[in-house]
Image: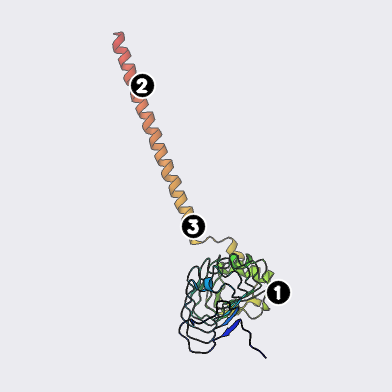
Amino acid sequence: MCPDPHTVDCSGRGLTRLPKQIPLDVRRLLLADNWIPRIPSDFLVLYSDLVYLDLRNNSLSLIEPGTLSTSSRLVFLDLGSNNLTEIPKGTFGESRSLIKLRLGNNPYLSMVSEDAFLGLTSLRELELERNALSTLKVGALSQLPSLRAVRLEGNPWVCNCNFASLFAWLMENSHKLPNGVEGMECSLPMDGRRVSLTQLSQDSFRECQANLTLTDLLIIIFSGISVSVVAIMTSFFLASTVHCFQRWSKGTKGDEEESEE
């Protein structure tokens, strides 16, 4: 069987950087099981025909802004089993052709921005399993119109009010989870005990609807203080104005009486 001339397989070579001698017309680049710590920000500018990129099981700790913003043809991207810590807004640019994205098994990945996947309109499969996520904004998932499957199991989810919206989304979209919610657990905020999501319901988060966050309370308190200060200043200004008017009136009246005498 003849090898594909547009495929470069450098998996398991002990590489500590991306190889230099990669054909510019490469379409499938396999770099799994190496020690590569970073991807140059101009990498995909050079390889604009790339549709399949496998960087699984390397030493990547971050994806520099703009690195993937030019990946207009990329369909498959595997960044699983690395050392990523966060997925900030705009990480994937406008990769509208991306269909499958693997981000699982990153043990230090604790933050995914709500707009991390903005623009990935063709994304069908998203893997975020076995990371360090305790919470996830539901907007990160709801803005993916083509999403068919998502993996979220194996994360240290916390069943607090921040998790309520995600829980509701999971209940409504359980068909998109490979094993439903059966394989997902979260920690109770009171004692840290882990429970299966199958043991919870919308009623479990009912009190969250009435609770205010610290930010909400600070806004209310600050607004109240601001209104009070404005009211006091307004009252002081009006009182000063009335007092000055009264003094002016008395002075005018006295002048008139002296003139009459």
Would you say the residues marked 3 and 2 are in contact, meaning their CB atoms lie under 8 Å apart?
Answer: no
Task: Give amino acid for label 2.
Answer: Ser
Q: Nearer the viewer, mark 3 or mark 1?
A: 1
Residue 157: where, in percent of width, then height? 56, 75
**CA separation in Å, label 1 and label 2:** 80 Å
> Where does label 3 land, which residue?
217
Task: Give amino acid for label 1.
Answer: His
Quarter of the image with the N terminus in it: bottom right
Instruction: State whether residue 258 is above or below residue 50.
Output: above
Q: Is residue 39 left or right of residue 159?
A: left
Q: Residues within 10 Å of mark 3 (few under 14, many from 20)?
A: few
Task: Give amino acid for label 3.
Answer: Leu
- Residue at the far right in the pictured view: 175
> Where does label 2 land, which residue?
249
Instruction: State whether residue 225 is above or below residue 53.
Output: above
Q: How many marks?
A: 3
Which residue does the image show at 34% across and 17% down from the upper left? 253
Out of 38 and 40, give the one closest to the viewer.
40
Residue 139: where, in percent of width, then height? 60, 65
Quarter of the image with the C terminus in it: top left
Task: Answer with mark 3 or mark 1, whichever residue precedes in sequence.
Answer: 1
Task: Answer with mark 3 or mark 2, whichever residue precedes in sequence.
Answer: 3
> Where does label 1 land, which residue?
175
- Residue at the far bottom in the pictured view: 1
Q: Nearer the viewer, mark 1 or mark 2?
A: 1
